[in-house]
């Protein structure tokens, strides 16, 4: 499952650089919120309470508008098990328990910029969750590589069982220049994990500049780098 949103970067080259900085700052703010809230989670906290904690943290830092309000999912709800209608995505009274995976998701608007992020964590040890996080890192590399190759959204979805974009005919075109909120999500045995961050696509002929993640200083990237170093 994934959601993708595109937005054309504003203006000329100088304005684009300033614009990208604005999007990066709000994305970092959202991830800082996710890390702060995750650090406060403990057994008995509900999804609704976790969503409220995100809202309050961001409002204290000047956020007054939202692309969408914060979500929180615990346990098998992180895998979106049996989700059929949009209302099922809203936070519930489900309580967090030891060993449970959780996902925090928010999309604040701040200083005229927005970001849509997803943060995965676990309250204690969960080997399935650890494996999903490792698999997601491979998806992050695959997505960037194949976007730079100008593969169609439909092909990227189909290659390596990547849950990105869609398999339908309307996705049978390369990613267009703009900012894309990319959200690969994996679920296995009632446990889910995902990340969500901004991918920048340009019309540059240089492969390295034709597509790049807006920021590599994000929790899931740092976590993987630390694991490799260890």
Image (spheres, helix red, strand yellow):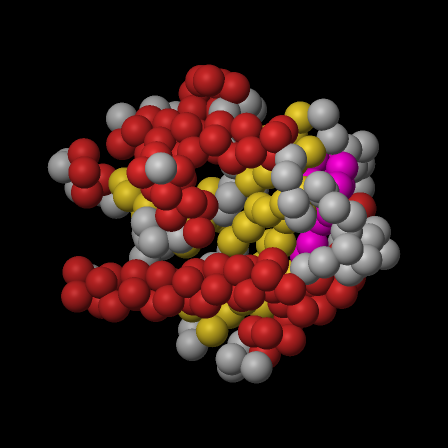
| x then y, percent, for residue 170 | 51, 29
Residue placed most toward the observer, 3 or 53: 53
The answer to which image quadrant residue 69 occupies is bottom right
Residue 10 in sight in this render: no
Q: Which residues are magenta?
A: 71-80
Q: Is residue 191 magenta?
A: no
Quadrant of the frame with the N terminus: top right
| x then y, percent, for residue 13 | 17, 60
Q: Is residue 78 magenta?
A: yes
12 over 85 or under it: above or below: below
> Residue at horizontal 55%, vertical 60%?
34
| x then y, percent, for residue 71 | 68, 56
The reply, left or right, for residue 194 in relation to residue 19 is right
> Residue at horizontal 58%, vertical 46%?
120
| x then y, percent, for residue 186 | 59, 31
Residue 155 in sight in this render: yes
Count of numbered marks: 0
The answer to which image quadrant residue 41 occupies is bottom right
Quadrant of the frame with the C terminus: top left
Q: Residue furthest right?
A: 93
The reply, left or right, for residue 135 in relation to residue 199 is right
> Residue at horizontal 18%, vertical 34%?
207
Q: Residue furthest front?
A: 230
């Amino acid at each position: 499952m994934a959601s993708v949103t595109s937005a054309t970067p504003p203006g000329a080259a100088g304005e684009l650089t300033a614009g990208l900085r604005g999007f990066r700052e709000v994305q970092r703010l959202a991830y800082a919120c996710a890390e702060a809230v995750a650090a406060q989670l403990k057994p008995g906290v509900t999804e609704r309470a976790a969503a409220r904690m995100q809202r309050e943290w961001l409002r204290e830092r000047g956020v007054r508008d939202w692309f969408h309000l914060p979500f929180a999912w615990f346990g098998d709800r992180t895998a979106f098990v049996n989700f059929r209608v949009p209302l099922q995505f809203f936070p519930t009274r489900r309580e967090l328990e030891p060993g449970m995976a959780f996902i925090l998701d928010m999309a604040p608007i701040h200083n005229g910029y927005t970001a849509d992020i997803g943060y995965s964590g676990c309250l204690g040890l969960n080997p399935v969750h650890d494996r999903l996080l490792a698999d997601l890192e491979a998806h992050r590399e695959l997505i960037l590589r194949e976007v730079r190759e100008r593969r169609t959204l439909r092909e990227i979805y189909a290659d390596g069982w990547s849950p990105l974009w869609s398999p339908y005919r309307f996705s049978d075109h390369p990613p267009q220049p703009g900012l894309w909120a990319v959200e690969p999500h994996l679920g296995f045995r009632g446990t889910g994990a995902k990340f969500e961050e901004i991918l920048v696509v340009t019309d540059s002929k240089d492969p390295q500049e034709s597509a790049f993640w807006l920021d590599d200083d994000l929790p899931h990237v740092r976590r993987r780098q630390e694991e490799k170093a260890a």
